[in-house]
């Protein structure tokens, strides 16, 4: 945990020092380009690497009634029989975290009694984090588009509709910190989660907190010159990189942490973003008895044949009056 | 077998989390926590690699010289063959949603029984050997060196997983520990590490056609013996066909149903049902096993044992296969069989119930129908005369087996059947049934008596749910659709909810079944008096 | 590669979405910092330009509260000069062209202050 925290603090310091000592072009232009390349290239490479392994068996985890008899209502989404149902199941999974929504917690009480509680906090905060992050990501497109499309302005209007403070507070900024805080807190304070957590579970959380934190610092407190920032970001996306004067250090910390996140992404558990689409227990229909699934490496059949079986047990079978393919006489004659 | 603690003591001895991290703790191979090793001759006869003498409680497991290379190459090969493994190794975020979903974790409190850590046991080695971060950062990236203790740990924990998939239901990415366990067990088998309780049935099934090693003549004798019991109860003499060609249907069920109490009553139930509806079927001694312990060793072994079903249907010229009540059998049939050994023999046809005319389109390709689907259809079409009052002395609940629940989705059919043959039916609490069902504690080949304490610990959530309905609703009967359940649930019920008896669903069907020409029923299939029927 | 017919379109969509800022700007002319119309007759604002650039929104927010809620109408600048707290009479007196001063920067950076929900926007220097 501490190693991850220190690593993120170190990254922040590197950016701060770098910005202060003339490496602004490196941090503001070179690294972001490199990070985007690594992110997209790495992401695609990981997906292709997964795709190189076949799915030998159709093994959906069925979370509801199968389709069998006409008068029994099947669970079309939790145990999909059709492609449409499977797409629906994946959409529920990807957009609404369906499986996490089922979450329960268990407790052994006196009696003994094993008691199950609904436990949707993880679902709620996970969903909150992901949607806030998405919203913040989309909001940032005001730095990549000129003119800024109305849709973005509308999103910002809604996100800042509470009109608290100047610049206006975005709800997504507050919620994303709260959600990250929750995700971190359960790693720290839940015995089970603490026990399973690795350095590479804390690192992304701290990195994201650093990223979000530096962004909030830059917007609400340090108030970097966003007109200059937009010159830089537009330079990046129009392939005419420029480094305008007078951008504060907070920006360089922010963009450096973002570059770290992008470059780290494909080589980490964050790849669950792509992996969730490839999970064979979710993305396949529950129709294996109706439609044959083909295994590309299906080995040749090798089994003990009936003939071999009968050869061993022929006499016993005849004695017991069981029908045989070859009588003892025929078998003897064949030898 | 070590002595079993009392239920209260068992719960009181669930330990707290250890202080050290999981990479620094080692399993303690106490008696009662590990399964006996497979016999060398069985391993050899089946062509398993590196058969050798070893035992889990010994310091040295006599691993083959190049064991590290075997594991490395074995894992590499499987990563290339199974996208599931590769994706599941990479995308876990350790959110912990799975942690308290595992019956073994609930019952043992051992953190490595949390599905996420069970997977990390393999994942840590994967990271070290197959990811750059793991190679560079080592333990910091959650990677660790493969050593002999890791192998021991794998053996310990991958044989404390019943491949029930309950964790995979809750995982936001559908990471399926059953898949990871199955592949880890494959790797252990590469080193010659198998367990007797699995390998002996596999060996038997290959040779005699069934797990129990019943030879053809004995199989026939046993079934005929069961038919005598049916005659005693109903007055009707049944002569089931064996290995006969030209029948429409081959019926295949786990051999446990032919052999062991209370499975035999379920088997009698099938025979009575088929007799009553005049089904054109045959039994087979060659394919006399529905279950597939091969699926607990390797995918190839599962395929090898499963191949007999289609081979026999083809030889006998049957149109389709009817399958009995069994859990993992139906995981294999529903999700693997057609892929393993299909396409089906050319003469087989899409199953159609000869009684109701219902076409089982959901089995159009595999051409195998679950008996619960078949019977539910019969009842729906009013083809059975039923007297559920014969089961009135029973208050029935239903245990969803893991595999039909989460690997098939067979949830309503057995309930429909039960509600029609019993007047008193209640479900256990919703977090313990249907897709959220809990394992009996003995799935995936762990139904062996030497690990009874582990089984009872794993059975805690199921046992406790049973006890709940026993106290609340007076449940005295737990119906199931699985031969392993019929073997594992009676000790579980005795331990956690004494007074509950375990029944196969078709035993209850047969009790209620009014057969043409039957004598007045005064006994159930167990030849126990039917209350209220004896003096009429 | 297996299941390419699903995975390849997926990758294309992914790459398309994440490179959107680049390809959508292919035809965009070089972006320049918005040039603001500065008052012809004044060289100095109430505070130094740097400070004004970062904090003008904050100053306006404080002025609004002081003028309307507290009735306080005098602002003492850092150089000791005293100004009348008034958007209309102080700020807009020099920065009379909203379109070429305020809006240029605000529009380009998608900032939409709610000053003009109440105030009447000035039409320009004419």
Image: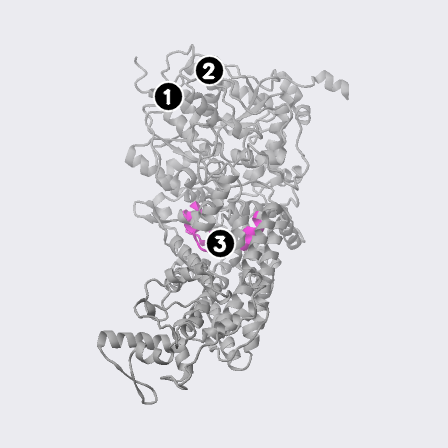
Q: Report the Cα–Cα distance between label 1 and label 2.
A: 22 Å
**Relative to B57, does residue A165 appear above or below in the rendering?**
below
Chain of the residue on which disc 3 is drawn:
B
**Mark 2, other Cα within 10 Å: few <14 / some 14–19 / many ≥20:** many
Tag 3, which secondary structure? helix
Query: Would you identify the image quadrant in which residue B17 lies?
Result: bottom left
Question: Label 3: which residue?
Answer: B117
Mark number, residue B528: 1
The x, y position of residue A173, in whole percent, is 39, 64
**Relative to B360, does residue B400 appear above or below in the rendering?**
below
Q: Residue furthest bottom?
A: C80
- Apparent side of residue A165 relative to residue B160 in the rendered image (left or right): left
**Mark 1, other Cα within 10 Å: few <14 / some 14–19 / many ≥20:** few
Q: Which residues are magenta?
A: B84-112
Disc 1 + disc 2, Cβ < 8 Å: no
Disc 3 + disc 2, Cβ < 8 Å: no
The x, y position of residue A28, in whole percent, is 54, 73
Residue B90 part of the magenta segment = yes
Chain of the residue on which disc 1 is drawn:
B
- Tell me which residue sits at (40%, 81%) in the image: C51
């Amino acid at each position: 945990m501490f190693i991850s925290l220190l690593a993120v603090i170190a990254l922040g310091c590197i950016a701060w020092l770098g910005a202060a000592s003339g490496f602004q072009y490196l941090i503001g232009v070179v690294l972001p380009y490199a990070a985007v390349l690594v992110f997209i290239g790495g992401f695609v490479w990981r997906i292709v690497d997964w795709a190189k392994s076949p799915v030998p068996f159709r093994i959906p985890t069925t979370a509801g009634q199968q389709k069998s008899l006409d008068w029994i209502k099947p669970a079309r989404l939790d145990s999909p029989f059709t492609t449409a149902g499977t797409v629906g199941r994946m959409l529920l999974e990807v957009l609404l975290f369906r499986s996490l929504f089922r979450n329960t917690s268990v407790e052994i009480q006196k009696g003994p009694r094993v008691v199950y509680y609904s436990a949707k906090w993880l679902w709620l905060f996970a969903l909150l984090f992901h949607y806030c992050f998405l919203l913040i990501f989309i909001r940032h497109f005001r730095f990549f588009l000129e003119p800024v499309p109305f849709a973005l302005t509308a999103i910002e209007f809604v996100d800042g509709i509470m009109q608290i403070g100047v610049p206006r507070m975005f709800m997504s900024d507050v919620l994303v910190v709260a959600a990250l805080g929750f995700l971190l807190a359960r790693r720290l304070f839940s015995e089970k989660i603490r026990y399973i957590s690795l350095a590479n579970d804390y690192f992304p959380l701290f990195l994201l907190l650093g990223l979000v934190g530096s962004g909030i610092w830059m917007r609400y407190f340090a108030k970097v010159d966003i007109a200059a920032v937009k010159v830089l970001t537009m330079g990046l996306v129009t392939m005419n990189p420029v480094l305008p004067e007078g951008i504060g250090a907070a920006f360089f910390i922010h963009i450096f942490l973002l570059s770290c996140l992008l470059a780290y992404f494909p080589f980490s558990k964050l790849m669950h973003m792509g992996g969730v689409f490839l999970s064979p227990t979710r993305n396949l229909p529950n129709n294996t008895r109706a439609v044959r699934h083909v295994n590309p490496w299906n080995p040749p059949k090798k089994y003990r044949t009936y003939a071999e079986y009968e050869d061993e047990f022929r006499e016993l079978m005849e004695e017991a009056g069981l029908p045989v393919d070859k009588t003892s006489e025929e078998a003897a004659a064949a030898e | 077998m070590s002595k079993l603690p009392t239920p209260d003591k068992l719960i009181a001895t669930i330990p707290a989390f250890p202080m050290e991290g999981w990479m620094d703790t080692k399993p303690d191979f106490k008696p009662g926590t590990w399964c006996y090793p497979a016999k060398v001759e069985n391993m050899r006869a089946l062509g398993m690699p590196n058969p050798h003498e070893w035992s889990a409680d010994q310091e040295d497991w006599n691993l083959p010289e190049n064991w590290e290379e075997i594991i490395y190459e074995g894992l590499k090969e499987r990563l290339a063959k199974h996208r599931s493994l590769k994706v599941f190794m990479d995308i876990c975020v350790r959110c912990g949603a799975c942690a308290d979903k595992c019956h073994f974790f609930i019952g043992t409190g051992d953190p490595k029984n949390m599905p996420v850590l069970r997977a990390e046991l393999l994942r840590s080695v994967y990271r070290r050997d197959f990811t750059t971060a793991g190679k560079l950062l080592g333990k910091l990236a959650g990677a660790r060196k493969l050593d002999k203790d890791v192998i021991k740990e794998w053996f310990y924990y991958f044989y404390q997983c019943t491949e029930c998939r309950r964790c995979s239901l809750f995982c936001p990415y559908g990471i399926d520990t059953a898949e990871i366990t199955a592949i880890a067990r494959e790797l252990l088998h590469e080193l010659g590490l198998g367990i007797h309780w699995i390998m002996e049935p596999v060996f038997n099934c290959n040779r005699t056609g069934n797990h129990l090693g019943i030879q053809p003549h004995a199989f026939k004798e046993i079934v005929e013996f069961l038919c005598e019991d049916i005659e005693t109860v109903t007055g009707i003499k049944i002569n089931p066909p064996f290995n006969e060609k030209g029948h429409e249907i081959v019926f295949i069920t786990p051999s446990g149903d032919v052999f062991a109490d209370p499975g035999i009553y379920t088997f009698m139930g099938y025979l009575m049902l088929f007799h009553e509806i005049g089904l054109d079927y045959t039994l087979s001694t060659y394919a006399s096993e529905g279950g597939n312990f091969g699926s607990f060793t390797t995918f190839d072994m599962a395929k090898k044992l499963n191949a007999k079903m289609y081979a026999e249907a083809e030889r006998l010229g049957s149109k389709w296969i009817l399958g009995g009540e069994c859990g993992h059998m139906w995981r294999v049939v529903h999700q693997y069989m057609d892929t393993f050994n299909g396409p089906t023999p050319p003469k087989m046809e899409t199953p159609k119930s000869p009684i109701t005319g219902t076409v089982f389109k959901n089995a159009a390709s595999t051409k195998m129908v679950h008996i619960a689907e078949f019977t539910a259809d019969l009842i729906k079409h009013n083809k059975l005369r039923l007297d559920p009052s014969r089961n009135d002395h029973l208050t029935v609940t239903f245990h969803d087996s893991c595999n039909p629940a989460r690997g098939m989705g067979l949830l309503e059919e057995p309930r429909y059947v039960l509600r029609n043959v019993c007047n008193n039916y209640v479900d256990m609490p919703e977090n313990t049934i249907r897709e959220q069902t809990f394992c009996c504690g003995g799935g995936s080949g762990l139904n062996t008596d030497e690990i009874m304490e582990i089984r009872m610990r794993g059975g805690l959530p199921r046992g406790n749910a049973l006890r709940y309905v026993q106290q609340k609703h007076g449940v005295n009967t737990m119906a199931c659709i699985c031969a392993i359940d019929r073997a594992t649930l009676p000790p579980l019920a005795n331990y956690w909810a004494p007074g509950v008896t375990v029944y196969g669903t078709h035993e209850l069907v047969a009790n209620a079944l009014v057969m043409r020409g039957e004598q007045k029923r005064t006994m159930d299939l167990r030849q126990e008096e039917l209350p209220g029927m004896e003096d009429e | 590669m297996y299941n390419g017919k699903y995975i390849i379109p997926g990758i294309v969509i992914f790459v398309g979405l994440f490179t959107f800022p680049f390809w959508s700007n292919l035809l965009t002319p070089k972006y320049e910092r918005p040039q603001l119309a500065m008052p012809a007759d004044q060289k100095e604002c109430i505070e130094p330009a740097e400070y004004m650039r970062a904090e003008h929104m904050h100053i306006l927010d404080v002025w609004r509260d002081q003028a309307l809620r507290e009735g306080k109408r005098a602002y003492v600048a850092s150089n000791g000069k005293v100004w009348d707290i008034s958007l209309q009479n102080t700020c807009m007196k020099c920065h009379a062209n909203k379109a070429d001063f305020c809006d240029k920067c605000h529009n380009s950076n998608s900032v939409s202050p709610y000053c003009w929900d109440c105030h009447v926007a000035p039409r320009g220097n004419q």
